[in-house]
Amino acid sequence: MRVSVIGTGYLGSVHAAGMAELGYSVVGIDPDADKIAALSAGSAPIFEPGLDELLMRHLRSGSLRFSSDVEDAAGADVHFVCVGTPQLSDGLGADLTDIHAAIDSLAPLLDRPSLVVGKSTVPVGTAHQLSDKLARRAPAGADAELAWNPEFLREGRAIEDTLRPDRLVFGVNSERAEKILRELYGTAIAGGTPVVVTDLATSELVKVSANAFLATKISFINAIAEVAEVSGADITSLADALGYDDRIGRKFLNAGVGFGGGCLPKDLRAFMARAGELGVADALTLLGEVDAINLRQRERVVELAQRLAGGSMIGRRVAVLGAAFKPHSDDVRDSPALTIAGQLHLQGADVAVFDPQAMEKARVIYPTLEYADSVVDACTGAHVVLLLTEWPEFRELDPAELGDVVAARVVVDGRNCLDGNAWRAAGWTYRGLGRR
Amino acid sequence: MRISVIGTGYLGAVHAVGMAELGHTVVGVDVDETKVAALSRGEAPFYEPGLDELLRKHVGTERLRYTTDMAEIEGCDVHFICVGTPQRRDGLGADLTHVDRAVDALAPHLNGSCVVVGKSTVPVGTARRLADRLAKLVSSSADVDLAWNPEFLREGFAVSDTLYPDRLVLGVSTQRAEERLREVYARAIEATTPVVVTDLATAELVKVSANAFLATKISFINAISEICEVAGADVTQLADAIGHDERIGRKFLNAGLGFGGGCLPKDIRAFMARAGELGASHALSFLGEVDAINVRRRERVAEIARELAGGHLIGRRIAVLGAAFKPESDDVRDSPALNVAGRLQLQGAHVAVYDPKAMENARAVFPTLEYAPAAVDACRGADVVLHLTEWREFRELDPRELADVVAARNVVDGRNCLDAAGWRAAGWTYRGLGRP
Ligand SMILES: NC(=O)c1ccc[n+]([C@@H]2O[C@H](COP(=O)([O-])OP(=O)(O)OC[C@H]3O[C@@H](n4cnc5c(N)ncnc54)[C@H](O)[C@@H]3O)[C@@H](O)[C@H]2O)c1
Ligand SMILES: NC(=O)c1ccc[n+]([C@@H]2O[C@H](COP(=O)([O-])OP(=O)(O)OC[C@H]3O[C@@H](n4cnc5c(N)ncnc54)[C@H](O)[C@@H]3O)[C@@H](O)[C@H]2O)c1
């Protein structure tokens, strides 16, 4: 089968490489010429473990190529749409400009039976609209069909998630579309991945609901951490105790500075906006609380740093460990680490940031922060050290060694992942969130 | 070990006989004479699968007795407090008078070395306060300390949850309390039940947080089902799809009429009230949304019933299948089924209720509803049939047979568990929640 992937950002570049790995002949399309040049040279414009190797292998074998000309997608049997759907710059809803543009450019090329498969995260109802548009504009008419197959990959494990997903959701209008998708994902399905076949609207909602639930779970435990803090309880053992209940589960119950990234925050807001358009805004006011709890965690860390620095940030040096919104990623979109760093900087602190992978991307959006070459550099002379992204190498830091370079041994563990006792034993003032 | 159980309601009656089954010598104490008389005859004062058998096995042996005389607890090694902590009449907080009275009544009878163990669900900080109260009241000859061991049993599975809990949470301030409790639960611990040992405050918070999470999960999917309704999506397929994500899990994702009973609603309200007292009300304002979503489902079901009845309810006959707040229970405290039945009656409908186990309890709280001896009788002449508690026998109803007795074939499946296709095939207008 010949496959095209329209939009080769985080999702699309991995998806294109993954489809090649599964044995298909793949072309990745993106108007961003720099991105295409990098991908064609086998170097991903993003950090994703294993991606470069995969790209290299399939570029060499000839089963994978990239192009900035959408005409090169003509002739494929299946077209995956993976373009971005960011938050509108002037509202909470999703900006669907790119996805409409992608369909507009693709439709005239569809002169034979083909399947267009949406993977981007979209507000419910979008697929139905796009499907009408496709039928009107494609020369093949109704034979150019639309399906929705939302993507659940996690950055940092994107390749594994693409090749062996935990579930496949097919939103389809016909048996033909289902059959093609089952064939495409034959390897995963044979390997036991469950498939949920449903309509377009349900498949769109599955994706935003899953993200909304994960966001809710994170904000839930962070809200409880706020109560734990004022009642002298310990959120870590509380989460362990909750997690044994299999209706709850321990995963995503780590209290800390909360979620960020290019998906959860924007998806949450787009979901609320869409509910409003559908006349049921009330249904999702819960998610407004989830969003508020999440943003409040960032403020709490800023306040905590202020208090520990003696009240005023002016002239204080702060080391921020972490810039990516989560470890094993260089994605800094809506990163809690960077928003905290930015706020402390605005309050007069001298902020030095270190991240193992995300320095370059961080520098682009927060050029006025200082970027250090190593953890030790960032911490040298610091009055407060903030751990804000739980990279394994930060967990393994030796508090005694670090104690020698800082100006004051004060650490805020924004991810509750350090061994509080060990840091205290090395003379540090250790503060977690919701932890004694 | 010699054990006393103070308060023998749902929790205490099961806990007492469970402790006897584990080989301990148990005395159960309650102020309610009728309850104690029933238990002493080996009869459970409420319906709980397996409880009668276990009572018959142990009552009358030297292992287990029930009494109203507090003096009989003298000499026990461990005293479990299992009295009620209902919602206050004048607010959202928990009414702690029973717990306080139980402690006051217990204290004079304590001597030697013993541990008082709270099992009731209480606001964080209560245990600390009770420990001080106890210290003031007990005689100098007694060596007492207080622990908190919240209970996670589910009505309907109470016996097996007591004998084989999924986790044990021990909130202790001394080694001795921990050792005693480990001895009490030795059998479960050997059988690999995980134990979380923590402080009093964390133990108290674990229980209310677990209930808050479960309530949040239920309201989450119910909020999504509101969106599904307007977007034409199917919440049951959606739940299957997001449930495959192990960070979410399929359990407690059944959209429907929502939660009720003697625990979840009062516990989340008491939790909010307590957060307010601690100055952290903002942390839990999301639970207000959870509560509101839940109550809104009751309104919605009443609304669908009214729609199906032709726009008004005056003089319409409505059959309500289910009165207990959940199946395998006769508990009608804050029951969604009865709440809906009551609403419809207040709007002029003639409502006939049937429940396999909860008729008597229902009649006590809603005496003006009609109670039918069987599902068929409740449905006779009905304009709308509402399925509101998912007892197995309701799922097994034959829609063709029932069709012959109703006035109009309208069914509202408030638990989304009837076979919609089967009912429709038999000529019914079937309405679920959040599904087409
Ligand atoms: N990143 C993730 O972890 C993830 C996971 C699941 C779903 N998603 C969803 O996938 C979608 C893409 O997310 P992303 O993180 O890859 O975003 P991204 O911004 O990294 O990538 C989007 C790409 O689409 C390209 N593009 C824009 N307009 C185009 C057009 N008309 N034709 C072709 N290409 C075009 C852009 O140049 C960009 O390279 C979003 O809807 C997102 O919510 C992302
Ligand atoms: N029912 C459940 O499924 C469940 C599960 C976990 C926790 N809990 C918690 O356990 C506690 C008890 O709940 P329940 O459902 O068993 O309530 P319940 O109302 O059925 O039982 C409480 C019992 O305590 C007795 N009592 C009141 N004051 C007393 C006193 N001073 N001395 C002795 N007995 C006294 C009452 O007569 C009654 O029999 C509550 O805090 C509840 O939140 C209940």
Image: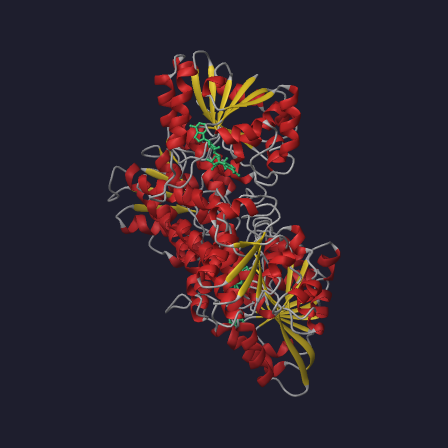
Residue A285 pos. (x, y %): 37, 50
Specify the farthest residue to the right. Answer: B190
| Quarter of the image where the N terminus of chain B is located | bottom right
Of residues B311 and B176, the one drawn nearer to the viewer in this rendering = B176
Find residue B278 and report its horizontal and vertical position in percent.
46, 70
In-front residue for pair B145/B53:
B145
- Left or right, residue A50 beside residue A311: right
Number of numbered tags placed on the structure image: 0
- Residue at the far bottom: name it: B140
User: Up-down: is A194 above or below B356?
Assistant: above
Image quadrant assignment for residue A155: top right
Give the residue displayed 36% in from the left and 49% down from the top: B296
Q: Is residue B31 or residue A17 the one in the foreground?
A: A17
Q: Position of residue A70 (x, y in %)?
A: 46, 21
Name the quadrant containing residue B228.
top left
Residue located at (59% from left, 39% from top): A47
Q: Is residue B33 visible?
A: no
